[in-house]
Image: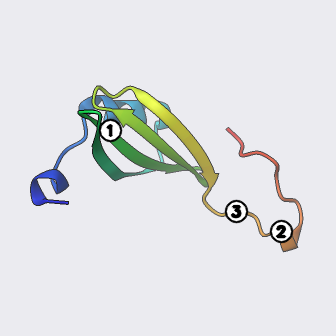
């Protein structure tokens, strides 16, 4: 990644989406950004309440995809492994 891309800032609409949908007590990190079919896409990771939300946005800040994972998956040897991630 060259330095001009490395220092690229995310669009305001993406930071506003995160602020609006995760309100407080969350961690936010830009994981990747790349050009896809001539447009920038941004992948950000938001961790809140022990759930990691991986969000992919277009350059206008439109959410394209969301995936969730537990930040600390339960140990199957301890029993009580949930089937779904709470919302």
Marks 3 & 2, CB-CB < 8 Å contact: no
Q: Is residue 65 left or right of residue 40?
A: right
Give the CA separation, mark 3 to mark 2.
9 Å
Q: Residues within 10 Å of mark 3 (few under 14, many from 20)?
A: few
Give the camera-side residue of 9 and 65: 65
Marks 1/2: CA distance? 36 Å
| Residue 19 in view of the camera | no
What residue do we see at 28% from left, 45% from top?
34
Q: Is residue 85 left or right of residue 61?
A: right
Circle 3 residue:
73
Q: Is residue 41 above or below residue 1?
A: above
Question: Which residue is painted at 42% across and 39% down in the image?
Answer: 56
Q: Residues within 10 Å of mark 1 (few under 14, many from 20)?
A: many
Query: Foreground: 64 or 82?
Result: 64
Colour scheme in use:
rainbow
Disc 1 target residue: 41
Q: Secondary structure at mark 3?
A: loop
Residue 51 coordinates in the image, percent (x, y): 60, 51
Viewer-proximal residue among 72 and 64: 64
Q: Which residue is mark 2?
A: 76
Judged left or right of residue 53, residue 16 is left
């Amino acid at each position: 990644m060259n330095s001009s891309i490395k220092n690229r800032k995310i669009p305001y609409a993406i930071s506003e989406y995160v602020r609006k949908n995760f309100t407080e007590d969350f961690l936010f990190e830009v994981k990747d950004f790349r050009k896809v079919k001539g447009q920038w896409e941004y992948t950000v990771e938001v961790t809140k309440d022990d759930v990691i939300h991986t969000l992919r946005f277009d350059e206008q800040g439109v959410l394209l995809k969301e995936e969730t994972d537990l930040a600390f998956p339960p140990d199957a040897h301890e029993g009580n492994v949930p089937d779904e991630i709470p919302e």
